[in-house]
Amino acid sequence: MTDQDIKTFDVIFECDARAVGKMRCEMDVSLVHPEKLSWEMASDEYGFHGGDGTAPLPIAYFMAGLTSCLMTQFRAFAKRLRVDIRDVSIHCRCEWQATQRGREPYESAPKSINMDLTVDSDASFEDVKRVIDAAKKGCFIEQMMNQQNDIGHRLKVGDEWVAV
């Protein structure tokens, strides 16, 4: 592939989740394209939402996914861009604010996401920044979050799917 060739590829994940027990959720998560891989995962809430804390909170998976996605892309693109890296660590902090009126369900809103990277390398600042910029663009989760996304929701009513 030359520097001018353009290649596109799709990445598709699916997740089937089931309610189990008080607040536990058991999930079958699958990469369906370009390869086929699957994992069994579970999440649970702690006492605040009536759960038993038998598995990580759903937000813990989000945090792990976001942080490890950038880490993976950083390491992969450092190799691709031929920038020698001895070590890298990332600290990610996400903040939300929840607002509740009376006994209504609360509404959550994002406040901030910050990632601090520590890179052990003899490479120049410019080269390391070039790798970070590429990793940010290549991180599927970060790119999904950087765009306004309309998430489709449907409810099965009888044999029909109804948009809700």
Image (cartoon, rainbow, N blue to C red):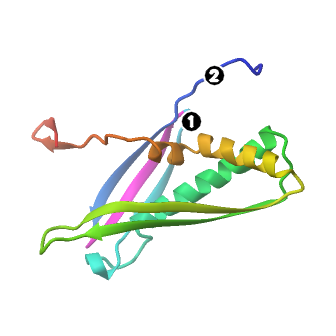
Q: Residue most toward the front? A: 126
**Residue 43 shown left or right of residue 39 in the figure:** left
Residue projecting furthest to the right: 122
Highlighted range, magenta: 21-33
Q: Secondary structure at mark 1?
A: loop
Give the crowd class for mark 2: few <14, some 14-19, many >=20 residues within 10 Å: few
Crowd around label 1: few <14 · some 14–19 · many ≥20 (10 Å) = few
Residue 112 rendering spot, x and y as whole percentages:
46, 62
Q: At 62% from the left edge and 52% from the top edge, which residue is drawn?
A: 70
Q: Position of residue 148 (x, y in %)?
A: 38, 41
**In the image, residue 148 above or below residue 60:** above
Q: CA distance from mark 1 to mark 2?
A: 17 Å
Residue at image coords 17%, 44%: 155
Left or right of 123? Residue 156 is left
What residue is disc 1 on? 35
In the rendered image, the quadrant that contains the N terminus is top right
Q: Which residue occupies the foreground of this view, 48 or 135?
A: 135
Residue 28: say if magenta.
yes
| Amino acid at dot 1 | Glu
Q: Is residue 23 magenta?
A: yes
Q: Earlier in the sequence, mark 1 or mark 2?
A: 2
Q: Position of residue 149 (x, y in %)?
A: 36, 41
Q: Which quadrant holds the C terminus?
A: top left
Residue type, mark 2 in image: Lys
